Image (spheres, rainbow, N blue to C red):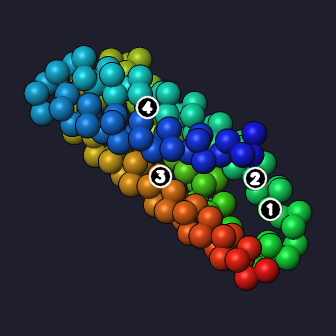
Amino acid sequence: MASLHPFFVHFPIAILLVAVLFDAYGAYKAHTQSTHSAFVLQLLAGIAAIFAAVSGNQAETILVKSAELNAGVGEALDAHISMGNLMIWVIITFVGFRMFAVLEKKTWAQAGWVFPALGLVVAGLVIFTGLLGGDLSADILDFYKKH
């Protein structure tokens, strides 16, 4: 499952960005169906983020077993792991908060700019985490070129 980590991480990144677009359109045009679509997309992103975290933890285990490689990319690995672990909790909290608002039929959740704004922040943090993963991949490639 570790080899599928890059596949699993791209899905929540893309789907969270699309959800922000649906949310923004729904808030701007007061289009309820768009906000419902954004909610469903965010639920799917939350599920995908769990797969990304599990596969990432397995990839970390493989990387840490190679002590020489781990020493060569340790800083990039630590940054990506820390942000990845934080992001799984941020996404779950965000989706849980959204689920609460939807189930409680909060009007501010359906027509306001709360979720488009929060969604944009979450998507930005996910992209940042992905960039850290890209740095890690580049460091691993550099390590193998030198050794």
Calculate the distance from the C-alpha at mark 1 to the C-alpha at mark 3.
Answer: 22 Å
| Residue type for callout 2 | Ala
Calculate the distance from the C-alpha at mark 4 to the C-alpha at mark 1.
Answer: 30 Å
| Residue type for callout 4 | Gln
**Residue 13 location, quadrant:** top left
Who's the residue at 80% across and 73% down the image?
Answer: 69
Q: Is residue 34 left or right of residue 19?
A: left
Residue 66: horizontal and vertical position, in percent? 87, 67
Contact check, label 3 and label 4, Cβ < 8 Å? no
Mark with earlier residue (3, 4): 4
Q: Residues within 10 Å of mark 2 (few under 14, many from 20)?
A: some
Q: Quadrant for the N terminus, please.
A: top right
Who's the residue at 70% across and 77% down the image?
Answer: 145
| Residue type for callout 3 | Val
Calculate the distance from the C-alpha at mark 3 to the C-alpha at mark 2.
Answer: 18 Å
Q: Is residue 145 left or right of residue 71?
A: left
Most extreme residue toward the bottom is 146
Query: Which residue carries the number 1 mark?
Result: 63
Q: Of the numbered discs in the image, which one, if any, rests on residue 114?
A: none
Above or below for 8 versus 83: above
Residue 44 in view here: yes
Residue 78 in view here: no
Contact check, label 2 and label 1, Cβ < 8 Å? yes
| Residue type for callout 1 | Leu
Query: Which residue carries the number 4 mark?
Result: 42
| Secondary structure of residue under mark 3 | helix
Q: Residues within 10 Å of mark 3 (few under 14, many from 20)?
A: many
Above or below for 103 versus 134: above
Calculate the distance from the C-alpha at mark 4 to the C-alpha at mark 2.
Answer: 25 Å
Q: Of the numbered discs in the image, which one, if any, rests on residue 59?
A: 2
Above or below for 142 versus 54: below
